[in-house]
Amino acid sequence: MNRDIPPLNALKAFEAAARHLSVKMAADELCVTPGAISQLLKSLEAHLGVKLFKRVTRGIFLTDAGRDYLPAVRNAFRQIAEATRRVRSSADDGILTVSATPFFTSSWLVPRMQSFRESNPDIDLQIVTSSALADFSRSSVDVAVRHGIGRYRGLRSDHIIAVEMVAVAAAGLVERLGAPRCAADLVGWPHVQDADRKGWSLWFQANGVEEFRSPRGPSFDDSSLILKAILSSQGAGLLPVAMIAAELASGDLVQLLDATLIDDLAYYLVCPEHTQDSRKVAIFRNWILNVS
């Protein structure tokens, strides 16, 4: 091996510590002890002959040399990850890994998967349910389906479907605050937010309310957690109509106003720009954007 290239573990420790500016957080990420991270950083500095970090009582900071070194190290890891994905994709050409939210998977994707299999028998779908946005550089996920406004830097987003969203609240909260007569009556209510904190703003705009400017309240990246927060009277929330039929029927939830279709707040197919034209991804995109 070229003697100018430091040990890989030391470079991984440097990148993680520089990103977090914390030895402890780097250790947690890499599943080692803080002492091990410190030793790796010292060995890297000895190998390079320069100090990469300033160590102070409450943490660490990058030196000028560390700031200069970090982009190259980060880019090298990114190139390795992308090359690994290409090799893995070539080796597993018949498998497409799709990350999707649990609700979308069960209510929309699974009932339609047979049509994909019939039209594309050489591609097997591997479904991974998650509510967090996939980290394409660190996982084997090829494409992801997410609910939001579809703006993700470095990723291609294609609008799949918008679903009607309904404002709901726990029965006890409605009894306490009174049933709203129009959308404007909900401005002063506590709100349970989606992860993007855009849902309520878009909902109020769609219902002709312009004075709602600053969404407050807890936010969640999982619709099931939003539902639980609403049921525990933490605030009114917005959820797809189909997801809450049982809670509405039981009376645990109260539909506050008519359902609203917000076209921007939709389900999107997301993938890295550099893989958007690969055969498997292109086939799946064409299918999911056209299936009824």
Image (cartoon, rainbow, N blue to C red):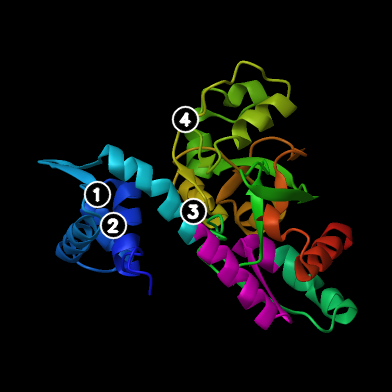
In the depicted view, which residue is nearer to us: 213 or 152? 152
Q: Nearer the viewer, residue 194 or 155?
A: 155
Q: What residue is shown with label 4?
A: 216
> Which structural element holds mark 4?
loop
Disc 1 versus disc 4: distance between alpha carbons?
30 Å
Query: Which one is in front in this view, the residue at disc 4 or the one at disc 3?
Result: 3
Please say if the residues under marks 4 and 3 sit with CB atoms less than 8 Å apart.
no
Which amino acid type is shown beneath numbered disc 4? Arg
Circle nearer the N terminus (3, 2) = 2
Which residue lies under the disc numbered 3? Answer: 75
Density class for disc 2 (Cα within 10 Å; few <14, some 14-19, many ≥20) is many
User: Height in image: 67 above or below 95?
Assistant: above
Which residue is tagged 1? Answer: 22
Q: Is residue 92 magenta?
A: yes
Q: Is residue 184 above or below residue 92?
A: above
Circle nearer the viewer, 2 or 4 = 2
Q: Nearer the viewer, residue 3 or 113?
A: 3
Q: Pointers 2 and 1 in contact (CB under 8 A)?
A: yes
Q: Residue at x 36, y 64 (%)?
A: 5
The magenta-colored residue range is: 78-106
Q: Which mark is residue 26?
A: 2
- Mark 2 to mark 1 CA distance (whole Å): 6 Å
